[in-house]
Image: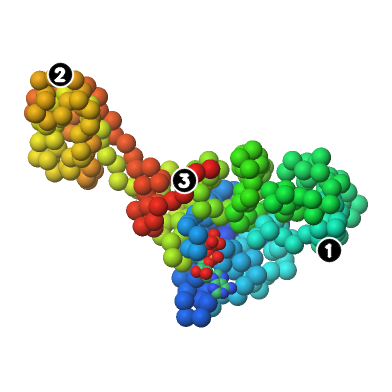
Amino acid sequence: MTDLGARESHTGGMYSLAIETHGLVKRFGRRPAVDGIDLAVPRGSVFGFLGPNGSGKTTTIRLLLGLATANSGDISVLGKEMPRSLASVLPDVGALVEGPGFYPFLTGAGNLMRLDSADRHAPSSTRRQRVHDALDRVGLGHASGKKVRAYSLGMKQRLGLANAMLRPRELLVLDEPTNGLDPQGTREVRALVRSLAAGGTTVFVSSHLLAEVEQMCTHAGIMSAGRLVAQGPLDELRSSGESHVLIHTPDVGKAAGVLSRLGLVPGDATGTGIPGNEASGRDGTLTGTGLNGMAPEAIVAALVTGGVRVRGFTVENASLEERFVSLTGEGFDVAG
Ligand SMILES: Nc1ncnc2c1ncn2[C@@H]1O[C@H](COP(=O)(O)OP(=O)(O)OP(=O)(O)O)[C@@H](O)[C@H]1O
């Protein structure tokens, strides 16, 4: 886990993790929706909380924000114990959870003015300007005077984001912020998240979309059936997956034999250089898995010594998708 450095929080005290949990459990009836998770979200990261539907993401977020009570475990947000320090921590946390309730008969700006005035930490003198700026940042400037009942789902989602950003925050917690947005809106929200992070805000964002997490996030945590099955910087998560080699050669049959002798597992050959047809001289492609730390140059040397005409050789790390599927046992929706 990358330590992005401790610093003094607005609320006092030093911390390097914006969110930390130990053994967090939430049960509904007998069934645990969150089953003993140890989250570590570095300050300054964009942390993608990734998992299939029903894996416990929303429940965890509700626990972090004090919207639900844990059966057991500890939570610390911005260096302070939760929910004991809720009142002092929440002013530094912007949240978008399950679409906030807006008054349909008020305008977008009217709703935000109202929500801001209910926040006793928000200065009233700058309210109008802050509302205006937040609406602009989420691309709703043109619709600020429209009644919310005329807003599309995507516009309501953006209004929820604008609400979370009415004041500078140390931490933003966003539950599926691109839900209901069209492709353009989705791109804008992703860019917005990145720009917030560039300004120093830690962003904890849930998603069931792998591609989204890959585009937006520096770190990820992977949920599966209430458990956090992996977490860390994206690069580390990728590199902990299994690598494989790709060999381009007209001698795929010979190459498969060499890989087997080295203890690798040859995959299916593709292309025209299939075994038995090697006289064609045309390239085929062969994959090999089960490297077990073997150096690529040792594999190339063995291939050449074994008489294989190596015309191309690549080591490929497992994609995040392969890694996540192997951890969760489920296919991921990689669209988006
Ligand atoms: N209030 C509740 N009462 C009973 N069961 C619940 C409640 N809230 C959530 N659950 C159950 O807990 C499990 C985790 O749900 P949760 O909403 O946290 O998952 P999720 O990963 O956020 O999925 P989604 O993206 O579909 O919201 C699910 O099986 C869900 O049915």
| Marks 2 and 3, how far apart at CA | 38 Å
Residue located 12% across and 40% down the image: 260
**Picture disc at residue 281:** 2
Q: Position of residue 147 (x, y in %)?
A: 84, 52
**Outermost residue, right side:** 125
Q: Are marks 2 and 1 in contact (CB under 8 Å)?
A: no
Dot 1 alpha-carbon crowd within 10 angstroms: few under 14, some 14 to 19, many 20 or more:
few
Asked if the residue at tag 3 contacts the one at tag 1, i.e. Cβ–Cβ closer than 8 Å, the answer is: no
Query: Which residue matches tag 1?
Result: 118
Q: Regarding mark 1 in the picture, which secondary structure is present there?
A: loop
Say which mark, if any, is on residue 334.
Answer: 3
Q: Amino acid at mark 1?
A: Ala
- 233 with respect to 263 (left or right): right
Residue lying farthest to the bottom in this orientation:
29
Image height of 223 relative to 218, above or below: below
Q: Quadrant of residue 64?
A: bottom right
State yes or no: Cβ of the residue under disc 1 lies below 8 Å from any atom of ligand 1.
Answer: no
Would residue 244 be visible to someone looking at this image? yes
For the residues labelled 1 and 3, the Cα–Cα distance comes to 39 Å
Q: Quadrant of residue 78?
A: bottom right
| Disc 2 Cβ-to-ligand 1 distance below 8 Å | no
Query: Does the CB distance between marks 2 and 3 fall below 8 Å?
Result: no
Estimate how packed mark 2 is, as few (under 14), some (14 to 19) or many (20 or more) residues with alpha carbons within 10 Å.
few
Q: Amino acid at mark 3?
A: Val
Q: Earlier in the sequence, mark 2 or mark 3?
A: 2
Image spot of residue 120 (x, y percent):
83, 63
Element marked by disc 2 = loop
212 over 149 or under it: above or below: above
185 lies left or right of 295: right
Labels 1, 3: front one: 3
Q: Residues within 10 Å of mark 3 (few under 14, many from 20)?
A: few
